[in-house]
Image (cartoon, grey):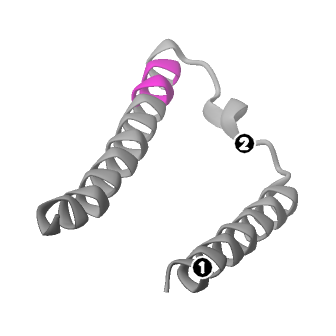
């Protein structure tokens, strides 16, 4: 049982890391391709970072509350 308890967080971390790695490398390659073609890379800048920050804060709070609820329930 201890091996499963160790492998689950490690595998979750690797999956999240892999998703971010693929996202950022793909975005970098797309921007380089646009620059090589002479296009403007400002296409990726939306300018609305406050809405995204609020969504991330709300998501983080919701996940933290859920984690605390399960921690109390399982103890």
Q: Is residue 23 left or right of residue 40?
A: left
Q: Is residue 26 left or right of residue 59?
A: left
- Please say if the residues under marks 1 and 2 sit with CB atoms less than 8 Å apart: no
Residue 53 location in percent, x, y? 77, 65
Q: Secondary structure at mark 2?
A: loop
Spatial distance from mark 1 to mark 2, Cα to Cα?
A: 43 Å
Q: Quadrant of the N terminus?
A: bottom left
Q: Is residue 27 above or below residue 67?
A: above
In this picture, which residue range is highlighted in magenta? Answer: 29-34
Residue 57 location in percent, x, y? 75, 71
Query: Label 2: how many residues lie within 10 Å, few (<14), some (14-19) or many (20+)?
Result: few
- Residue beneath the point at 62% across and 82% down: 68
- Residue 73's label in the rendered image is 1
**Magenta region's main secondary structure?**
helix
Q: Quadrant of residue 6?
A: bottom left
Query: Label 1: how many residues lie within 10 Å, few (<14), some (14-19) or many (20+)?
Result: few
Residue 59 location in percent, x, y? 73, 63
Tell me how many marks there are.
2
Residue 21 location in percent, x, y? 35, 43
Q: Secondary structure at mark 1?
A: helix
Most extreme residue toward the top is 37
Taking depth in this image into account, of 50 and 32 the one nearest to the observer is 50
Taking depth in this image into account, of 24 and 10 the one nearest to the observer is 10
Decide whether residue 46 is among the magenta residues: no
Circle 2 residue:
45
């Amino acid at each position: 049982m201890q091996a499963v308890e160790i492998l689950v967080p490690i595998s979750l971390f690797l999956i999240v890391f892999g998703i971010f790695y693929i996202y950022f490398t793909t975005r970098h390659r797309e921007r380089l391709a646009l620059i090589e073609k002479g296009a403007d890379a400002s296409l990726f800048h939306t300018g609305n970072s406050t809405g995204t920050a609020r969504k991330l804060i709300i998501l983080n709070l919701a996940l933290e509350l859920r984690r605390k609820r399960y921690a109390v329930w399982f103890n």
